[in-house]
Amino acid sequence: MRFTKMEALGNDFVVLNAMQQPLKLSAEQIKLLSDRRRGVGCDQVLLAEAARDVGADVRYRIFNADGSEVEHCGNGVRCLARFLVNEGIVSGPRIYVETGLGINVVEIARDGKVTVDMGAPLLKPEMIPFRASAQEVTYNLETTSGSVDISAVSMGNPHAVLVVDDIATAPVHELGTVIGAHPRFPNRTNVGFMQVKSRDSVMLRVYERGVGETPACGTGACAAVVAGRLRGLLDSTVNVELPGGQLEIGWRADSEPVMMTGPARAVFHGEINI
């Protein structure tokens, strides 16, 4: 099977073209592809499939390194768009990508950066999903590591966002593991740790469900900015510094879409027998 290894801010992917012939991969095969010692190695496996919606160029599916399928990935959709253009599957610069939650519009600029319309954030608890009696800006969460205040946001996948004083010393693995599997998040959740530097700049680390901490998380950056805006801490355009690099996130308010801009590139092509 042919594959392309891609990365966006150090968040890496194995991309497979399943547009002509459907691929049915088992969880064990996904784990093999993702294994950094016995396979190709990646945070997630991306499948480009034939679109079901007539308004889309491609259908996009995402599988975590543990074999579980997830709803969305911001860095992944940028890599997918770059892959489609590089392979001549679409001409660009505007690409319509179908996900299980609708269609994302992706644009590739001349400087190589990719901008994605990530859609409006979901904030109602039942839509995230998150167990709460009413929608709030922050929620107090009791954990085995103590009580913490979080914001709960869905960008097509669930996120818990914590504001911390210093991300360098934040207990990302400890709290990420505990909050990620908290019973109030029935589908588990990604966990973001955000340090606010100014109204237009934050630092962020993200513990992703099914993966662990990654160098960058596009939906996590979007969720963090939404959470910061709702708390009154941030302006409408914010530079998000992740361990792997920077993303520009824009969100005005309410039902407006979140716009994400950042890089994506192919690393190498290859074949693997799975």
Image (spheres, grey):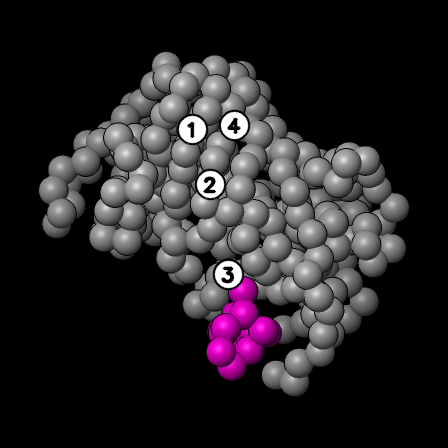
The boundaries of the magenta stretch are: 25-42
Amino acid type at mark 3: Asp
Q: Does residue 68 sit above or below 149 in this rendering?
A: below
Amino acid type, residue under disc 2 in the picture: Leu
Under circle 4, the secondary element is: strand
Instruction: Count neighbours of disc 3 (C-alpha within 10 A) and say few if under 14, some if 14 to 19, many if 20 or more.
Output: many
Question: Where residue 76 appears, x then y in whole percent?
Answer: 60, 50
Which of marks 3 and 2 precedes in the sequence?
A: 3
Query: Disc 2 or 1, which lies upstream in sequence?
Result: 1
**Distance between mark 2 and mark 3 Cα atoms:** 16 Å
For disc 2, the neighbor class at 10 Å (few under 14, some 14 to 19, many from 20) is: many
Q: Earlier in the sequence, mark 3 or mark 1?
A: 3
Judge whether residue 108 can be spotted in this image.
yes
Q: Could you say which quadrant of the image residue 93 lies in?
A: top right
The disc placed on residue 193 is none
Residue on which the image places disc 3? 43
Marks 2/1: CA distance? 9 Å
Q: Quadrant of residue 192?
A: top left
User: Between marks 4 and 3, how big is the CA–CA gap?
Assistant: 23 Å
Residue 242 is labelled as 2
Other residues around mark 1 within 10 Å, as few (<14) / some (14–19) / many (≥20): many
Separation of residues labelled 3 and 1 (CA atoms): 23 Å
Question: Label 1 near label 4: C-beta < 8 Å?
Answer: yes
